[in-house]
Image (cartoon, rainbow, N blue to C red):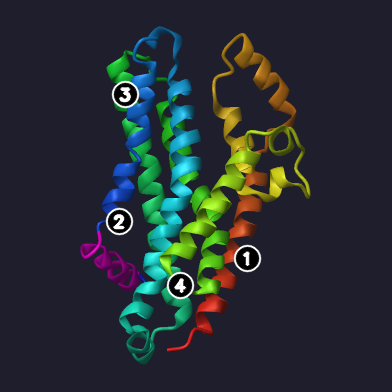
Amino acid sequence: MLKLIKCEFYKFKRRSIFLLATLAALIFPVVMTALYWNIPTQVSYDNLYSGIVDYGDFLLLLPILTVIATSLFFTEQDNDTLKNLTVVPISKGKIVLAKISVMAIISVSYTLAGFLASTICSTILGIPMENMGQKFILSVALGLMLLSAALPCVALVVWFNKSDLISIVFTLFYTIVNYVVHVTDMGMLTPVGVNVGTLLPIPLINRWIYQFYDEGSGAAAEFYNTMRPYFVSTPVCICILALIALVSIYAIIQIYKKREI
């Protein structure tokens, strides 16, 4: 399996998408730093970090992961090399797992890059940095959780077996729906159950991560008091996302096995 993962990474030598994905993680820390430049005394490290997570991870990482998945899953088809892999022999299931492992590494690398950038930006702004260890663990967890969030979209892309254009359309629609729902009461002020706030991964992850931020004061404290009954515990969040991931991976493997070679 390790050799397969290495082979998948070798493909990025001919494509710059991995480097671009990592660099994209630096966009929102820079933007947030510019926004907070004139008001550093009113900003906490939690404010900066949550802003980077909200825009950089929830809004940008999902499309990046799906575009990378499109590149990974269609490379053999475009170059007519899938037949060579099955002759070795290597099962299509292992090929799928290797590609998803690459996506996991990229996703965690992205969230950690955002974490490091937020640390640098906080230093520049003179913002005291607290709970750094917790933020590091949250960043790793977010990388894996957002991979789970992206997998249903990846399954659709593999199923339709179409070009990059149709993949981008699916991804944008999926990302927009998730992001819009996560800023509505329907997505956030709802208990765990059969509802969009639970079934859509971004609102679910939001209701999990909010409990680790500083409550602040004033309007922020009022917001957290409203949200508190709807926070999702870590075990529940992990179980739901693991179920989404397992179902998606199973679907991807079954679809990939039926692909003609």
**Marker disc for residue 247:** 1
Give the residue at mark 4: 96
Mark 1–mark 4 Cα distance, whole angstroms, equals: 14 Å
Tell me which segment is drawn in magenta.
Answer: 2-15
The kind of residue on which mark 4 rests is: Val
Drawn side of residue 236 relative to residue 164, left or right? right
Mark 3–mark 4 Cα distance, whole angstroms, equals: 37 Å
N-terminal-most mark, 2 or 1: 2
| Residue farthest to the bottom, as pictured | 87
Mark 2–mark 1 Cα distance, whole angstroms, equals: 27 Å
The kind of residue on which mark 1 rests is: Val
Give the residue at mark 2: 17
N-terminal-most mark, 3 or 4: 4
Drawn side of residue 212 relative to residue 122, left or right? right
Q: Are marks 1 and 3 in contact (CB under 8 Å)?
A: no
Mark 3–mark 2 Cα distance, whole angstroms, equals: 25 Å
Q: Are marks 3 and 2 in contact (CB under 8 Å)?
A: no
Which residue is pictured at 32% across the width and 68% down the height?
Answer: 8
Front in this rendered view, residue 83 or 234: 83
